[in-house]
Structures are given as C-alpha cells and as structure tokens.
Image (cartoon, rainbow, N blue to C red):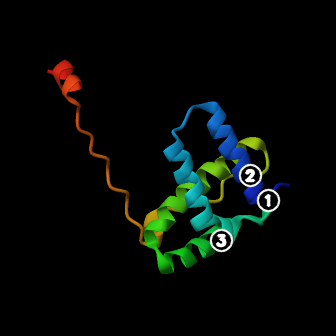
Amino acid sequence: MPIFFELWQNWLEFKLNSKPISPRTQEDYTGTYHRYIEKAFGQVRVCDISRSFIYEQLSQIRKTNAEAVRKGLILLNMTLDHASLQGYIEINPSRLLKPAMFGASMGKPRERWLPKDELQLFL
C-alpha cells in the first residue's frame, strides 16, 4: 500500500501523460501539495486516510487560511479518486467534504477578454 506522497506522484505523472497541462498548472498542483497537504498526509498510507482524518487536518489548515482548504480539498479529491481507480481504496473519503464546511468560499470566476482578431470573428 503506497503512502500518500507516492500516490500523489503517481497521480501527477498520470495527469501529465493523459492530457497536456500547462507548466503553470503543474506548478500550482505542486505548490498546493507542498504548502497544504504534504505535512499532514505525505507519510500516511492511503488506506489509512479516512473522512474524519481529512476533516481534522483541514480544520487545522482552516485556522490559518480558510481559502487554502479549497485548494487542498480539490487536490485531495483528484488524488484520492485516482487511488480508487487504482484499487487502493473502495471510495474516496474526501468526496463528501465541501470547502464551505471549512469557511472557504468559491474561487473567483475567470474573466476572459476576446483579443481583437477573435472579437472580429465573433461579430
């Protein structure tokens, strides 16, 4: 049974090979892992991660940065979904946890402006 760090590395490699992601996205995933997840989850066996364990760890993160919970929970969900698909766990224990439970709000929606050439095509 892998520890979470090994699972996360495997998930990131799978993600990079399945569809191209930008270097910025890869950097964001790596930064989020190291800042918010590694300390609490990195050395824990995947099968030992329970919903109550996740809740406790995210509650600790919430005390310093509620918005970090949203980013951490998103990454946990994707990684633990990968563990489920690999057969390490039956269900993803983070699936029912929502950022709002920890006082985190939704991220700001992106605003996109059309460049001049796309605007001309649109019109």
Indicate the secondary structure of the residue bearing disc 3.
helix
Is label 3 or label 2 in front? 2
Quarter of the image where one finds residue 108? bottom left
Pointers 2 and 1 in contact (CB under 8 A)? yes
Give the distance between the C-alpha atoms of the residues marked 3 and 2, in whole angstroms.
20 Å
Q: Is residue 28 above or below residue 55?
A: above
Residue drawn at point x = 58 percent, y = 31 percent = 19
| 46 sits left or right of 51 in the view | right
Residue type at mark 1: give it: Ile
The mark lying in front, picked from 3 and 1, is 1
Mark 1 secondary-structure assignment: loop
Q: Nearer the viewer, residue 78 or 34?
A: 34
Q: Is residue 38 left or right of residue 60?
A: right
Q: Which residue is mark 1?
A: 3
Quadrant in the picture for the C terminus = top left
Answer yes or no: is residue 96 visible: no
The residue indicated by pointer 2 is: 7
The residue carrying pointer 3 sits among few (fewer than 14), some (14 to 19) or many (20 or more) residues within 10 Å by Cα, namely few
Separation (CA) of disc 2 from disc 1:
6 Å
Give above or below for 51 relative to 20.
below
Q: Position of residue 64 (x, y in %)?
A: 48, 79
Residue at 65% from the left image edge and 47% from the top image edge: 81
Which residue is the site of mark 3?
52
